[in-house]
Image: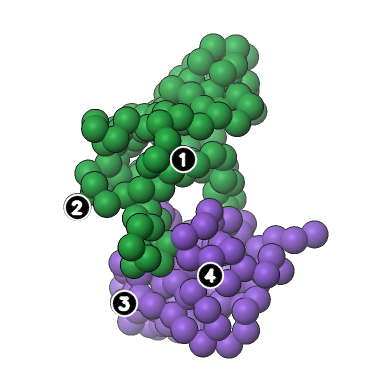
Chain colours: A purple, B green
Amino acid sequence: DGGITQSPKYLFRKEGQNVTLSCEQNLNHDAMYWYRQDPGQGLRLIYYSQIVNDFQKGDIAEGYSVSREKKESFPLTVTSAQKNPTAFYLCASSMYSSDTQYFGPGTRLTVL
Amino acid sequence: DQQVKQNSPSLSVQEGRISILNCDYTNSMFDYFLWYKKYPAEGPTFLISISSIKDKNEDGRFTVFLNKSAKHLSLHIVPSQPGDSAVYFCAASANAGGTSYGKLTFGQGTILTVHP
């Protein structure tokens, strides 16, 4: 089955720790994205990547980092510099950068 | 600066009737619009999209209308079913010129409840 997987579904971390969220897709999509959703708000773009070994900052990149070493994978690291890391994180991919984006199931990160 | 707005936080509809979800935008560079459906603790599911060269797009029970002069789009669901109960997000991107890199700007979402 083709799709986007994110793991884990729930993640708990202590304040001050870095944490990496996984995103994998087997749709052969070139472009991948990371969004954050907070209660009562729409999704906000953190980082995006149009192609392997290339990525750009979105609207709220501060305190986050990404890598794109493989076409299928786009992990997101939430660093200790992110002031409000507790949120629902969503990964998406699209065939090319202007195509419809399809989302994974999300990871709920809670920082204690 | 909220470039995409869904001014109704919630909508309640009877099963079998029409649901109309509205979305307004301010950025005249937006030329591609999408609607997503989302259940709690899940990723959004793509429903339907429309390019700015069209004013209507249909897919089964779902129809999206675009009024460019008013910078307004709406999603019609006919007939509404209890399984349609979810949060609906509209999203927009500015693809012309190739500089948006597919960035989607989302509205805040509207909670649709369809009563049996």
Residue indicated by mark 3: A62
> For the residue marked with disc 1, what is the amino acid?
Ile
Percent coordinates x, y for residue A19 in the rendering:
51, 80
Q: Is residue B14 above or below residue A92?
A: above
| Residue drawn at point x = 43 percent, y = 62 percent | B102
Of badges 4 and 2, the one in the foreground is 4
Percent coordinates x, y for residue B3 in the rendering:
25, 48
Q: Are marks 2 and 3 on the same chain?
A: no
> For the residue marked with disc 4, what is the amino acid?
Ala
| Residue drawn at point x = 54 percent, y = 39 percent | B48
Quarter of the image with the C terminus of chain B in it: top right
Q: Are marks 4 and 2 on the same chain?
A: no
Q: Pointer 3 and pointer 1: residues touching (CB < 8 Å)?
A: no
Residue indicated by mark 1: B50
| Residue drawn at point x = 51 percent, y = 32 percent | B57
Q: Pointer 4 and pointer 2: residues touching (CB < 8 Å)?
A: no
Of badges 3 and 4, the one in the foreground is 4
On residue B1, the disc is: 2
Q: Chain of mark 2?
A: B
Percent coordinates x, y for residue B24 in the rendering:
29, 36
**What is the crowding at mark 1: few (fewer than 14 residues within 10 Å), some, or many (at least 20)?**
many
Q: CA distance from mark 2 to mark 1?
A: 23 Å
Q: CA distance from mark 4 to mark 2?
A: 26 Å
Local secondary structure at mark 2: loop
Q: Are marks 3 and 1 on the same chain?
A: no
Q: CA distance from mark 3 to mark 1?
A: 32 Å
Local secondary structure at mark 3: loop
Q: Pointer 4 and pointer 1: residues touching (CB < 8 Å)?
A: no
Q: Is residue B5 left or right of residue B40?
A: left
